[in-house]
Image (spheres, rainbow, N blue to C red):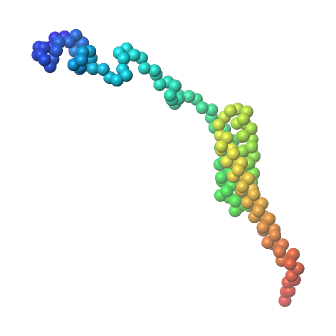
Amino acid sequence: MTNPYGSGPHNPPSNSGGFPQPPQSSYGGGLQYPGYQPGQQYPSNQNFYIGYGGLQPPNNGLAIASMVVSLVSVLTVCFWGLGSLLALLGVIFGHVSKGQIRRDGTRGDGMAMAGIVIGYCVLGLLLLGITLLVIGLSLPFMAGSTYTTM
């Protein structure tokens, strides 16, 4: 390719196929960058990160069910039968899912543990509430007081 403007001090002739040459230093040779060697191969960064394409094992369905059922049991703790039933189901689902996670290698161990802990806490609160209710109802009988009716 020929330069239509001719060669001059600012446009030296080149054989680069129309692409500009890098600037020349006054000490000879091209402009060098620190640490750069022409033709040097740099190491790839394959070992520095893990790509997004890796497959992960799925979450265990019973672990999710354990956590959800135990959380719903907290909301229904005032309904004596429903709260205790849901808490008990959450504990059972949690223990079964932890066994499946160990056996299958699926994910969800934290959700299973959360379901177990929340379920046991709700069952403990319900047991405490029933105990206090029974004690409260039996206090008049233990005090030996008599009621008179007219």
Q: Residue furthest front?
A: 27
Report the residue at 79% width, 72% height from top.
Answer: 136
Residue 90: give x, y in percent of width and height.
Answer: 71, 49
Q: How many marks?
A: 0
Which residue appears at 69% of the width and 52% of the height?
118
Residue at coordinates 86% horizontally, 86% vertically from top-left? Answer: 148
Q: Position of residue 147 (x, y in %)?
A: 85, 83
Q: Is residue 44 above or below residue 87?
A: above
Horizontal and vertical percent for residue 57? 63, 32
On the image, which quarter does residue 25 sit in? top left
- Quick check: can you spot residue 35? yes
Residue at 35% in and 15% down: 38
Residue situated in front as seen by the camera: 139 or 93: 139
- Asked if residue 128 lies left or right of residue 16, the reply is right
Q: Nearer the viewer, residue 1 or 12?
A: 12
Q: Pick the quarter of the image with the N terminus.
A: top left
